Image (cartoon, rainbow, N blue to C red):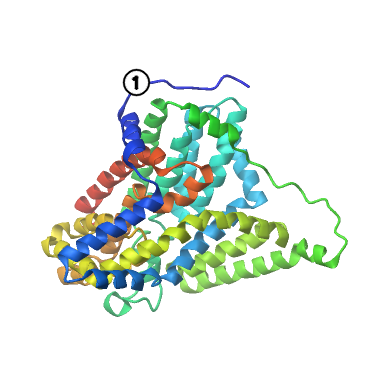
């Protein structure tokens, strides 16, 4: 094996942040427990709630969003199965061999993740796991040890590019029958996420992140722990099935054509629905349906798809563990009146000129304790959307402000990083320095857009 590439540099801002996060940033699950306690204490002192009423509010919220939980889990589950299919893996492995040095590999992965997250956040998460490991393993074969913590961080902070055609809350209000339709009507996705300001914003952030990651790589120092972990990774392609099956049950388990037929029919149903109702009709359920049909087409038989599903389940275990606790936090915020108090305070001080910027900032702050766009929108929208109407502000821009606020602090909140962290076996504190700098870059750029364009 060739000598490993190493960068030894003087202590810089990234190293300083790494040292700080190593000492002070807890794991994701203890963090949600701490957030629960903080919100409960604020509710106790800022509202008329008692300890017993807060506990009941927490329990009422704990199981209040099971439908949304299942939708989110299915997005991650089906997105992983698509990226885990042999044809997709073959393409990813080919891509992973292209870079000739560390910088090329990191920038390829960055652009790859930006595109995937823009198309769908579940694809971004799945791509971070599958493409990330493929890239690390294939480059290791060349003697190039990639910056592991940085690769994982890229797979997490590119979530900010989810402000695209499959963003959750814009999809919700683009669907007929949503809970605020009587107030704001239906807002097609083509009037919110797919507008000129949003396209320009995503392009500018993509360029800024390329520059940022180039700087990251130039100042990166590979640790011995990272090198050992990289040595332990593998990326195995599924072998062609040459076995002869004798029993009827075995033949049925490995018979591909019924599965492929159902997948093709389902894909036709998806295309027909979009053609009939337009791109604005794309909803969470429709996206889940699309990915499940693609998985049927791409996997070679029911047995292979079942095996992929067993692996995909592991990517959502952290969400299933922690999401009820975040839902409980949502219950305290909503039922105690704390959320209404905070939102009314922000809306009251917001001037018409800076209204969307204030919505963006407040949504970013609230997302730290309710890191789910859907549940947060249920809390926030009944206040910010009528306020936008009263001030004569664009409902679409207000929706964009909420969406980007909800996304930007996901970069420093471990909720959505859990599946990627679990796949690579590292902790949130190891990627925090890179995520924090990416958060600052995104926050500044997005703020400028809401102050200067989408107001």
Horizontal side of 453 relative to 196 (left or right) equals: left
- Residue 449 in view (yes/no): yes
Q: Residue at x 32, y 59 (%)?
A: 403
Q: Residue at x 64, y 55 (%)?
A: 308
Splitting the image into 4 quarters, where does residue 94 fall? top right
The residue lying furthest to the right in this view is 246
x and y percent of residue 346 in the render?
16, 61
Q: Residue at x 72, y 57 (%)?
A: 300
Give above or below for 230 relative to 10. below
Horizontal side of 296 relative to 42 (left or right) equals: right
Residue picked out by circle 1: 10
x and y percent of residue 432 in the render?
36, 41
Looking at the rendered structure, the secondary structure element under dot 1 is loop
Give above or below for 409 relative to 151. below
Please identify the quadrant where the C terminus is shown.
bottom left
Give above or below for 38 relative to 44. above
x and y percent of residue 323 in the render?
41, 61
């Amino acid at each position: 094996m060739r000598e490993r590439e190493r960068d030894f540099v003087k202590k810089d801002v990234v190293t300083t942040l790494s040292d700080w996060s190593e000492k002070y940033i807890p794991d994701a699950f203890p963090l949600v427990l701490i957030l629960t306690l903080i919100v409960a204490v604020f509710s106790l002192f800022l509202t008329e709630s008692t300890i017993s009423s807060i506990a009941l509010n927490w329990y009422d919220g704990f199981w209040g969003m099971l439908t949304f939980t299942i939708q989110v889990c299915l997005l991650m589950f089906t997105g992983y199965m698509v990226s885990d299919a042999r044809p997709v893996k073959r393409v990813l492995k080919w891509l992973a061999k292209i870079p000739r040095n560390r910088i090329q590999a990191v920038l390829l992965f960055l652009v790859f993740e930006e595109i995937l997250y823009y198309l769908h956040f579940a694809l971004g998460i799945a791509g971070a796991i599958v493409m990330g490991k493929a890239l690390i393993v294939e480059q290791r074969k060349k003697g190039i040890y990639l910056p592991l913590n940085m690769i994982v961080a890229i797979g997490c902070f590119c979530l900010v590019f989810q402000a695209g055609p499959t963003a959750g809350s814009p999809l919700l209000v683009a669907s007929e029958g949503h809970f605020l339709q009587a107030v704001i009507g239906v807002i097609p996705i083509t009037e919110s996420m797919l507008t000129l300001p949003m396209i320009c914003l995503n392009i500018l952030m993509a360029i800024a992140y390329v520059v940022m990651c180039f700087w990251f790589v130039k100042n990166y120092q590979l640790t011995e722990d990272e090198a050992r972990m990289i040595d332990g990774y593998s990326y195995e392609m599924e072998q062609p099935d040459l076995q002869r099956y004798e029993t009827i049950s075995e033949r049925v388990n490995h018979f591909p054509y019924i599965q492929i037929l159902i997948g093709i029919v389902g894909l036709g149903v998806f295309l027909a629905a979009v053609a009939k109702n337009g791109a604005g009709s794309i909803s969470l359920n429709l996206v889940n349906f699309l990915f499940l049909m693609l998985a049927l087409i791409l996997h070679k038989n029911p047995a292979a798809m079942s095996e992929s599903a067993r692996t995909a389940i592991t990517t959502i275990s952290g969400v299933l563990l922690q999401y009820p606790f975040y839902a409980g936090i949502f219950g305290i915020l909503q039922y105690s009146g704390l959320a209404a108090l905070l939102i009314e305070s922000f809306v009251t001080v917001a001037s018409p000129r800076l209204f969307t910027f204030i919505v963006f900032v407040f949504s970013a702050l609230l997302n730290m304790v309710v890191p789910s766009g859907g549940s947060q929108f249920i809390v926030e929208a009944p206040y910010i959307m009528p306020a936008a109407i009263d001030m004569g502000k664009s409902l679409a821009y207000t929706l964009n402000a909420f969406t980007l606020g909800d996304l930007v602090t996901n970069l420093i909140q471990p909720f959505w990083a859990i599946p990627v962290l679990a796949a690579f076996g590292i902790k949130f504190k190891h990627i925090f320095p890179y995520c924090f700098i990416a958060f600052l870059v995104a926050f500044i750029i997005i703020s400028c857009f809401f102050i200067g364009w989408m107001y």
